[in-house]
Image (cartoon, rainbow, N blue to C red):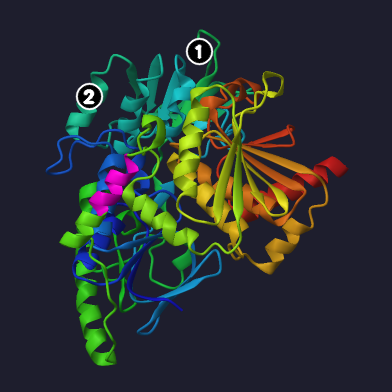
Amino acid sequence: MERYDAIVVGAGPAGLTAAIYLARARYRVLVIEKAAIGGQITITSEVVNYPGVRKADGKQLTAEMREQAEAFGAEFLQGEAIGFDLEGDFKAITLKDGRTLQSLGVILALGANPRQAGFLGEEDFKGRGVAYCATCDGEFFTGKEIFVIGSGLAAAEEALFLTRYGRKVNLLVRGDRLKCPEPVTEQVENSATIQIHYHTQVTAAGGNSVLEYLVLRNRLTGAEEKYIPEAKDNIGIFVFAGYEPATTAVRGIVATDEAGYLITDRNQKCSIEGVYGAGDVCIKNLRQVVTAVADGAVAATELEKVLVEKYVRLSLPKIAVSNKNDETQIKTGLAETAALQEQPDGMPGAFLDATLRQQLQGVFQQLTKPVHLRARLDNRPVSREIRHFLQEICALSDKLSYQCEEPEKAAVTKLLPEIRLETDDGYSGISFHGVPGGHEINSLVVALYNLGSDGQKISSELRDRIVAVNQDIRLEVIATLACTMCPELVMASQRMASLNPRIEAHMFDLAHFPDFKEQYQILSVPCLVINNEQVLFGKKDLAALTDCIEEYLREKQR
């Protein structure tokens, strides 16, 4: 079992800060993140109240935090922690793929997930008008009327962001005021595109194939009104009704309050020795980037004291940590970066920077079987990007190879370009339509790992259910590269394809296949299409996707 000095679960601002402090102190630190590095702040387009940074988007800010942590030697792992054994000197964390990791201390920076508003029709119209991420789905409502539910800072900021797209943005507030800083409130109130509706809540929403109306209730009078836009066009509802702490896996192990938030002392210590909480997952009055990084710094420095005591008391040998801020490491990094800029045909190394390249090499070292990437191209610019992307990826391992085919015009279909993953046994059933960059590079890496090694571990019960599917299933996941929720569904579908030859998994980048938007009435991603018949929305893990396939097959048999 691999041992670390500290494991940080969650890579939002709190977790990244903790990693910076611990790695800088020369401890071996692993950061585990199941979704996107950066947490909820990555969907915020403009951060203007973080000291020392006049303006930055959330993704940029946290990307720099990660680079800083890695420069001090912190390690990162994409995976979901589902089991926690936190008693005693050595803590054990079990990942969803079956691996178990050990450490002397743990920092829980688990974050929080968006809460549903609870109105009638919310579940039915997810992806068809109801959304939870303005960054992912705002563009789908260009020229439409948009409603934003919420009164906090997130709702206000997202309402401002959505003015880029909507012809009118209605901010629905249950109370009599906005609960956010005065400058943001003034910005919302002074916007010519935003109209604020106080004492207002949505009780129902509906339509035919997409969202076309909503029912508004005045909380003072109790009167309800069915609202249909004058243009009788489809509308969008963006829900920002607060968050729920992501503590399901640790409830009953560490102390939480009734809502599930971690109970910590002023030093961020949880109810178990050597375990600390940080960020939005903790009980606190203010949930902001600045308070998250403060939590992470406090938790890390307090954990350092525990680590010092344990090393002495247990007579443990120190684990060596590579600090990339060392002069030799910096020179190596600069050399790698320079090498990446020298691409054929003058194409810059836009897909893999030096840090990502080094990480991928570590993953690909675990490949024991060859995987071939066969690209079927068309004459669009995206096909040229695919060539260079495959060159960069396959240069990282002798187990990876690629071939590009340019079909005759008669053979060109609306589904090109396509990258098919093949093994020595032939086509694996896994395809990417477009460049699997952005967040989807994680999907590609996991797919290559599953095909080129023993693959991610899953329970025997779940494996048996997937293998038992005895009808041809074609899964199409329509995604955008900026969506943080899409990769989980893409990876789940591809894992199914890697285990059962009767299942195919195709990832489509909506930017290059815009016809799907109208064909499937897509107003949110990810969108899942089963056998060109059933359309579902929202992220799903492997177990949830398996449930969907089984339900689909039962419906077909009725």
- Dominant secondary structure of the magenta stretch? helix
Q: Is residue 390 left or right of residue 427?
A: left
Mark 2 or 1: in front is 2
- Check disc 2 and report its element: helix, strand or loop: helix
**What's the residue at 71%, 19% (across, down)?**
410
Residue 505 in which image quadrant: top right
* Disc 2/disc 1 C-alpha distance (Å): 25 Å
**What's the residue at 37%, 51% (across, down)?**
356
Q: Which residues are magenta?
A: 333-341
Amino acid on which disc 1 is placed: Pro
Query: Residue most toward the left?
Result: 52
Residue 228 or residue 240, whichever sits in front: 240
Is residue 111 in view?
no
Amino acid on which disc 2 is placed: Gln
Residue 316 in which image quadrant: bottom left
- Check disc 1 and report its element: helix, strand or loop: loop
Q: In the rendered image, which residue does mark 2 sit on?
A: 187
Number of dots carrying numbers: 2
Is residue 287 in view?
yes
Q: Is residue 500 left or right of residue 450?
A: right
Q: Position of residue 553 (x, y in %)?
A: 80, 45
Q: Quadrant of the C terminus?
A: top right
Circle 2/circle 1 CB separation < 8 Å: no
Mark 2: give few (<14), some (14-19) or many (20+) Cα within 10 Å.
some
Residue 81 or residue 205, whichever sits in front: 81
